[in-house]
Amino acid sequence: MATNLSKISRENLTSKVFQQIKEAIMSGRFQPGERLPIRSLATKMGTSITPVREALLKLVSFGALEMKPAHPITIPILNKEGYLENRTIRLANEGLAAAEAAKKIKKRQLNRLVKINDDMFKAAREKRFADAIAHNYSFHIELCRAAAMPALLEIVEILWLKIGPSLNMLHVATPNSLTIAKTNFHREILQALEKRDSEAAKTAMEQDLIQGGAALLDYFDNQPS
Amino acid sequence: MATNLSKISRENLTSKVFQQIKEAIMSGRFQPGERLPIRSLATKMGTSITPVREALLKLVSFGALEMKPAHPITIPILNKEGYLENRTIRLANEGLAAAEAAKKIKKRQLNRLVKINDDMFKAAREKRFADAIAHNYSFHIELCRAAAMPALLEIVEILWLKIGPSLNMLHVATPNSLTIAKTNFHREILQALEKRDSEAAKTAMEQDLIQGGAALLDYFDNQPS
DNA sequence: ATTTTATATATGATATATCATTATTCAAGT
DNA sequence: ACTTGAATAATGATATATCATATATAAAAT
């Protein structure tokens, strides 16, 4: 029996389309309010409308896209209230993830987090703000992965999907106010993980989420939409 | 302009199908492992397969149903590990919901919770276990609604969808061990809500979730699947 | 009787066609 | 110039047809 045969990708079209649109959303390639018509996406991606529709419906069911009857599917426009609710829920879930990760994280995963954090600082120093935002996202997701709770990871990914477009819009609107690399608590989180101190990890994570959203809150306050 | 015109239901077929299947899952009309073939459901419901497929895919994306490539869609079989992860996440999210509800709940909502709880006890006394389980579910969902955080409510509903079939299976397998009405902390939760004591509400909720799952944990321990 | 193989069936995946509703455009009327 | 109304286009919703793959059944071989 031949070994080392490469796995044939049995992923279906819907999954591929979903991943691609999801990544596009998280990397800020759509503005809040922007339309995502099924047909034009299908044309761009070279599939029929069925897989695109299914992928979009999935994102809608996660609250990452908005759909009103007989209206085009759009990127939701987050307001202050919605952001604060999202932050409160992330506090609970990412706090839990940090506490669990402190118990379970392996050296390799910890090193990976350190590297992601370094990359984030480097990107911010070099004013590659979009990259910095992406690395910040990776930091939170990978930490959540270290908690080894797949259902929790899914929830946290959904929560970030909802704020992704606004986060990226912020860096376009006011790149100078990007505080991701200046006032975060990643170091405190990493230290707590290394000490395997669940409580400290949770607290540091909560502070990080509150600080990380300060710039966005300022934006909402000065943008009386 | 005429007023008081009744709203025309613009809900689409997919939503209706989704609601119906969701309720069927939560009320235990499907066994863990049972198949849900698209075509036969569509025939039963009198629609084409498209709305049914979309509704099922939505449930799959919530983790309430399982789908392997080229296999029938099924009700997932929960194991002890999966249940414990689900419980841990509910502790965080329903704890938050209870704390928020303590701040925001209105008298009408509190009265409603009291009534649901009474109904649950009544159902349990009369050995209508399925009803008791349904009322317990309502209690948790309505409390979550009182927190006035729509995104949190969605998450909690998803979490319950995943354990619904197993909860109902339990009451069929071992109706005598149904402890829902005996060892719950609903009274403590209600008292905390009335006092507007967030911390107490959170603690009582956590105890309720742990106690409420004890019977299911026993089942997993004696069922070495 | 058991195992193997071939056929038929069931099922999800994808593409396409058509419908209803809304948004847009543009011309006519004021 | 502005408003109104009709025609057109855009868009999601639904139904149906076809395909690929897995499962179940039946037949054949041992």
Image (cartoon, coloured by chain):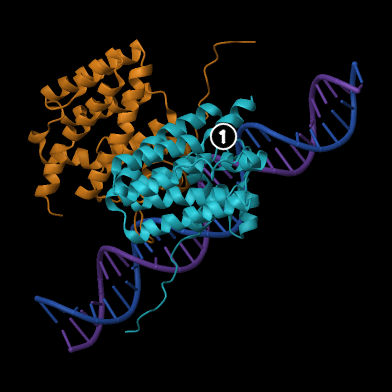
Chain colours: A cyan, B orange, C blue, D purple
Residue A89 place in picture, x, y as percent: 41, 34
- Would residue A32 appear left or right of B33 to someone viewing this image? right
Say which quadrant the N terminus of chain A sits in.
Answer: bottom left
Residue at 25% across / 41% down in the picture?
B165
- Would residue B35 appear left or right of B10 to someone viewing this image? left
Estimate how packed mark 1 is, as few (under 14), some (14 to 19) or many (20 or more) residues with alpha carbons within 10 Å. Answer: many
Residue B50 place in picture, x, y as percent: 47, 47
Residue B5 visible, this orientation: yes
Residue at 45% across / 50% down in the picture?
A139
Q: Secondary structure at mark 1?
A: helix
Residue positioned most to the left: B176
Residue A63 place in picture, x, y as percent: 49, 38
Say which quadrant the C terminus of chain A sits in.
Answer: top right
Residue B65 place in picture, x, y as percent: 34, 47
Residue B66 visible, this orientation: no
Of the pair D20 and B122, the residue shown nearer to us:
B122
Which residue matches tag 1?
A216
Depicted A179 relative to depicted A139: above or below: above
Of the pair B141 and C29, the residue shown nearer to us:
B141
Judging from the image, mark 1 belongs to the subunit labelled A
Depicted C25 relative to depicted B137: above or below: below
Residue at 31% across / 21% down in the picture?
B198
* Amino acid type for the residue under numbered disc 1: Leu
Depicted D1 relative to depicted B37: above or below: above
